[in-house]
Structures are given as structure tokens and as C-alpha cells.
Image (tube, helix red, strand yellow):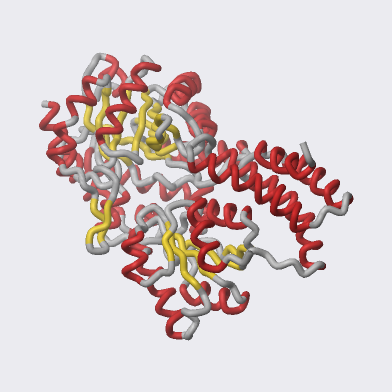
Amino acid sequence: MGILEQISASLQKGNDTHVAELTRRAIEKKLPPKQILDDGLIGGMAVIGERFKAHEIFLPQVLLAARAMYAGMDLLKPLMIRENIPTSGKVVIGSVQGDLHDIGKNLVAIMLKGAGFEVIDLGSDVTPEQFVSAAEKEEAGAIGLSALLTTTMPVMKQVIDLLRERRLLSKIKVIIGGAPVTQKFADQIGADAYAFDGVSAVERVKALIGRE
Amino acid sequence: MRSILDRVRQGEILVADGAMGTMLFSRGLKAGDCPEALNLTKPALLTEIAQAYFDAGAEIIQTNTFGASPLRLADYSLADQTEEINRKAVKAVRQAVGQQAYVSASCGPSAKILKPYGDTKPEAMFESFKRQVSALIDAGVDIICVETMTDLTEASLAIEATRAVSATIPVMATMTFDATPKGFFTVMGVDIETAAARLATIGADIIGSNCGNGINNMIKIARRFRKHTKLPLLIQSNAGLPEIEDGVLVYPETPEYMAGKAKDLIDAGVSIIGGCCGTTPEHIRAIRQAIE
């Protein structure tokens, strides 16, 4: 097994020490950071995402794999910045104002990071103003909005209204999700995409703003 | 009042109450507000809800303390009022039911994830539950209900914390399962067989499931539990899974529909039938009538 496959395999087992050690070794071997990221970490996270979606594994395994992924990414990040390697894109995400639920949002953040996106996570109970100003300041390509409560879903529309008001709608895409959210609701409020789960969130964001 | 455990062990079927959260939302609770803060500000509202369920025929009425553990109250900077919030909740229900019904103390998840998957130490979670349960038992609840659990370790810590406070108070424990193509699992990956074995070992007196499913899945869940435990079973089903109609959340299962399935739950070996999200006093009244 090549070192990148080993990284992927250790990540899938949730072994953060192995992933860090192997990533360090891959860097020493002068493998391109982008390749370590794509074939090692992102490859491993993609498998985790699919297996979670298929109910073969559960939240604990995803959380451990995510931690292993971060252990590798922390080592690669300085190199990627130094060599000016672009990320897959930048996404601002959060649970909307009034909503303190964040497990779903955290999963989406994990999956997006695992697909090479830079994620600015604003946490939960985030106001429309906070979403829009963060996205503008960070020059994010997309905003991801999460809601578990139906009572907070109208905030999603407020974010879109604010983007329109600031003439940012063409620049910043909006993707929404959460248990009560549907494609129909996304169409009604003019969101660019709806994602049913973490894996489809990555697919949608890639389609909206992903660079190759 | 006779002990709840004596009654279910002798084969009696008891009716518990229905939803609290959706009742509070329909009475003006705002998203993002702490539901348990109402115990301090609007206890009369809680007495009113308890009264409605009692009048509908429920014999087990829950306190509004689902999120009243200090770990969870800390999200609203209310952890220092843990004792007061729990005490007031018990008082509000007792005021409605007196000694005519059992006051059941709701203890929901901490919303934290235990190490190694998350950051929370088991000792901290144990202490959090212990502090909540102490306040509830001091205030005179009849039974502790550890509910909506998805992590078996967290459920165990809550039961152990209860046992550390009182060796004798009855404990019910329910978990929330998702229907997957491979069977029922909690989001943390716990199946029914494992849950049944562990909850019994740790010291729960009554076990079962609440939330996450409508009545048809709950019948399947109850049958599976029955296969793996001799303990009395408790089932609190949602009124189906919520759908959106014109921007409003609607739970599709009517009182008549759910009551029509009560017999199947009893045939599956369930001793206590109540409701979870979306159920109302009308659901409980219909279930009560169906059982009689």
C-alpha cells in the first residue's frame, strides 16, 4: 500500500496519530501537498461520507475520522498557503438565528472540509447580518444555512433578502439544509441549492462554486 | 398511590402524557428561547399543560425539564439556576395532578458529545445529571425518565447518576432510533438489542423508545425490545414525521389513527403508552379510550 492509501486507510479508522505521522512522512518524501490532500485525506473522507450515508457507520466513526483528517490538514495547511495552492473554495456556514442545533451543521462542515473546501463556521444562532458580512469579508463563494426548527426557517429567506439588498446575490451562492427543509422550500425562497445530507451538500457546493 | 412498578409488573397498561415541546411552541415559545426558562417565568402555563394531559386520562405526567441539566442550561447561561428550574417544574405539575397521577421527571440529553468523539468528560456529564436529578428528587418526583437518548454511554451515566442519588426511585429510560435499511439504530449507532441489554444492566426499571418515529415504526421497535428484555416497556411515539404545509409544521397522525394502533403496541408487550412530538391531549384521550 502506498503512503497516500495508508493515510486514507488510517483516516477511515479514525487514527489521528497515524494520519499525522504518515502525512509528515509524505511531506518529507516531497510528495506535492495537493496530492497528499486529494488522494490521502479527501479520498479517505469521501469513503467515510458514503459509508455514513449508507448507514454502515455512525456519528462516532465520522467524528473520529474528522479528527484524523484535521490532524493531517493542520500539517498541510502552511505548505498549501506557502505554495499558493487554492482550496476547493470558501464557504461560510452556520445554524440560523434562533436555532441552537448544530450537529447537522457540524457534519456538513466536516464533509466540506473533507472535500478540500475552506469552511468559516459561524456556529449556531447566527443572524442574517453576521452571515452576509462574514461572507463578504471572507470573499466566500457560498453561504450554507442550517435549521432544525421550522420556526427558524424564515431566517433563511432573510439572508437571501439581505444578499439581494447588498447586490451580492450573483456573487454568493446560498445552499440550505436541515431536517424540516425541502427542495420546495429552497425554490420558494430562491436559494441556489438544497442538500438533504452532508454528502449531497458537498456535491451541491461543488456544482455551485467548485474549482477544478 | 400504588407504586408505578407494582402496577406495570402486574400487567396493568398505563397511559403517559404527550408532547411538551410542540405544546410550548404552539403557546408562544420562540425558537432559540430556553424552554425550561418558562419554569421560572410562566409556571402557570406548565400547570395548564399538565392539567390538560391529566384531564385527557394520562396517569404519568412529565416535567418541563428535558434540557434542565446544568450542561445544557449553560448554553443559555442558566446553569446556576438548575435547582430552581427543576424544582419549579415539579411544583407546576404537582399542582395540577396532586397525588392522582405520577410526576415523571424528564431528563434529556446534554447535547454534548463524550470523549473520545467529542470534548466532554464522562465525569462532567455524570455530575451534570446528578445535579439535575438531585433537584428533581428533592422536589418529590415519582419517577425519573431518561429520554431521547442516542448515546448508550450518556444514557448509562444518567441512570448511574440517578442511582447515586437514590437507590429506590423508579427509572425509565428511552432511546431514539432511526429506521435504516439495515434496521433500527440511533445516530450514534446503537441497536435495540444492545440498548435493551445495557439499560437493564445499569439499573433501569422500565425501558423503551421515544421520538424520531411514527406509531408504525414504534410497534416494530417495541416488538424488537420485547424479544431482548423482560423489563416493562414504555413507548412514546411522535404523531408521525412532520411535514410542511404552507410554511407550517404539521404532524400527520391523528388521535384516531394513533389510538387505533394502541392495541398493536399492547400486543407487542408495551406497558406504558404515551406520545412525543406532535401529540396533544386529544391524542392521549383517544389512546386512553382505546385501551379501556
Look at the picture and state if A33 lies above or below B288: below
Q: Which residue occupies the foreground of this view, B161 or B179?
A: B179
Give the side of residue B70 with respect to residue B217, left or right: right
To which quarter of the image does residue A32 belong? bottom right
Residue A208: horizontal and vertical position, in percent? 51, 67
User: Is A186 displayed left or right of B112 in the figure?
Assistant: left
Picture residue at 52% right of the left edge, 28% below the top? B160
Q: Residue at x 60, y 47 (%)?
A: A46
Q: Would you identify the image quadrant in which residue B120 lies?
A: top right
Nearer to us in this view, A81 or B151:
A81
**Residue A60: percent from the left, percent from the top?**
57, 39
**Quarter holding the C terminus of chain B?**
top left
Dividing the picture into quadrants, the one containing residue B17 is top left
Q: Where residue B46 sits in the image (x, y, percent)?
A: 28, 50
Above/below status of A4 relative to B2 = below
Could you tell me how many numbered marks the image carries? 0
Q: Residue B144: image x %, image y %?
A: 39, 32
